[in-house]
Amino acid sequence: PLPFLALAIFAAGLSLGSAAWLFGEVFAPALATVESAWRWPLTGLALAASYFAYGLTLLLVAPALNFILGGRLRPYRGSAVSLAALRWYVHCTLTLVVRYSFLEFVTPSPFAQLYYRLMGMKIGRHVSINSTAIADPSLIEMADGVTIGGTASIMAHYSQGGYLVIAPVRLGAGATIGLRAIVMGGVEVGEKAKVLAGSFVLPNTRIPAGEIWAGIPAR
């Protein structure tokens, strides 16, 4: 929908402002004094540095807009086309614009975890997040020592009976979500439990502590 496209453009545009300033005010004057043989490769490096300025700024701008616009999620079950669902669309928009334009470059790193925390995710100590396929971060909780494998998907929402359902996901201390595994809304994974690579955990599943689950659906 156009309002959320406009929101994505607004967030990206504000962040691009820092990149434009860095290039125009810092790099461009310096490049003007460089001989032509070096100017183009140095211009490329300057543009790349400006892009990273955009991305790092976006990691702060998106959570700020999410907070201002009330994008912090609450559990919900109802129509996907309603005023109550608006905060989910805001949250999704500001999550996706970061994910698809920059987040891959800083995952895994403290920058990515800072972004998720600012979006409302509860993250313990020594957590490793090796995936950007995380939706609804404000309703996801990861206790100490959780490991998220590469391209694993965690989402705190699903559709059921024609309704949008938003439900928190909780991963206990030391839990592991394997490569390309999918975890849906309402799931709780116990301490030191493992979901093996490529598995699909159905909504509202409870995985007891220490167990190893695998398959589609995982069991």
Image (spheres, rainbow, N blue to C red):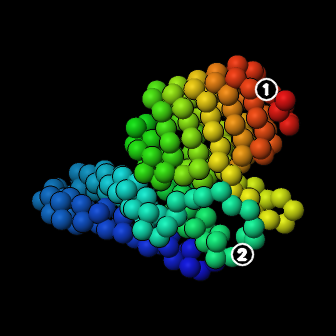
Residue occupying the point 77% across, 44% down? 204
Residue occupying the point 82% across, 33% down? 218
Residue 110 % position (x, y) = 40, 38
Residue 72 % position (x, y) = 52, 60
Q: Is residue 163 above or below residue 39?
A: below
Quadrant location, the N terminus: bottom right
Tell me if 54 is positioned left or right of 116 in this view: left
Q: Earlier in the sequence, mark 2 or mark 1?
A: 2
Q: Quadrant of residue 147?
A: top right
Quadrant location, the C terminus: top right
- Outermost residue on the left side: it is 33
Q: Which residue is mark 2?
A: 81
Q: Nearer the viewer, residue 10 or 72?
A: 72
Residue 177 % position (x, y) = 66, 31
Q: Which residue is mark 1?
A: 213
Residue 32 % position (x, y) = 16, 63
Q: Is residue 179 above or below residue 137?
A: above
